[in-house]
Amino acid sequence: MNFNDYQQQALFTAVDMPRNDDLIHAAFGLISEAGEIADAIKAEMVYGKPVDQVNQREEVGDGLWFVALTCRLLTISMDQLVRDLPPDRTDAIGRCRYAIHLADAAAAIAMRIDSHVVGGRPLPLEAVRQELGRFLMHLRSLGTLAGVTLEQAAEGNLRKLAARFGGAGFDAERGLNRDKAAELAAVAGNAA
């Protein structure tokens, strides 16, 4: 899969906002997706609730969507970012640590964006690119543990977006009043 193509298809569903608002949207999205993944792992650790693998695949796809948005805003090639990832060594540190590192990368990106948008400082593009690469690396590892590659997560994300928005692009009503079961079925590849 060419991730620049994924980016173009996925971001058909992005809301049109001023650049600084879009940057904050991207930062919040990276943080929230990392948090959703971590929350499922925490529930398994603390409450013994098994991690729902389809939901984890969905969250990996959602994380990709926000990487795509960030790349578009900063004119970073998403495809090159994925190709520059080191080989996958998923068994190296375990799911909990991958989730912590994912959240750390998201927070680092968000802090740089905040410093730029709110603080008026120049945005260090290479540092953000490196953090996005780190975010993607840990997202890929968490996807591997959920039984999905980045490519499969991207395809599932596109199916989910089609289930939510059809071909109409972003629509706030459809985004808020979504059919979660249909979206998860689409992610799992069970949708017609």
Image (cartoon, rainbow, N blue to C red):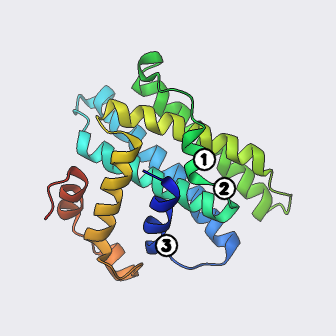
How far is disc 2 from disc 3 in space, using C-alphas?
17 Å
- Mark toward the start of the polypeptide (3 vs 1): 3
Q: Quadrant of residue 103?
A: top right
Q: Residue at x 33, y 46 (%)?
A: 152
Q: Does residue 157 lie above or below 163 as drawn?
A: above
Type of amino acid at the residue the image marks with label 2: Ile
- Badge 2, how many Cα within 10 Å: few under 14, some, many 20+? many
- Mark toward the start of the polypeptide (2 vs 3): 3
Q: Which residue is mark 2?
A: 76
Type of amino acid at the residue the image marks with label 3: Ala
What element does badge 3 sit on? loop
Q: Which residue is mark 3?
A: 14
- Where, quadrant-wise, is the C terminus in this rendering? bottom left
How far is disc 3 from disc 1 in space, using C-alphas?
21 Å
Q: In the image as oriented, which residue stretches furthest toward the top? A: 92
Q: Is residue 17 left or right of residue 39?
A: right
Q: Are marks 1 and 2 in contact (CB under 8 Å)?
A: yes
Q: Which residue is mark 1?
A: 80
- Badge 1, how many Cα within 10 Å: few under 14, some, many 20+? few
How far is disc 1 from disc 2 in space, using C-alphas?
8 Å
Q: In the image as oriented, which residue stretches furthest toward the front? A: 2
Q: Is residue 18 left or right of residue 166?
A: right
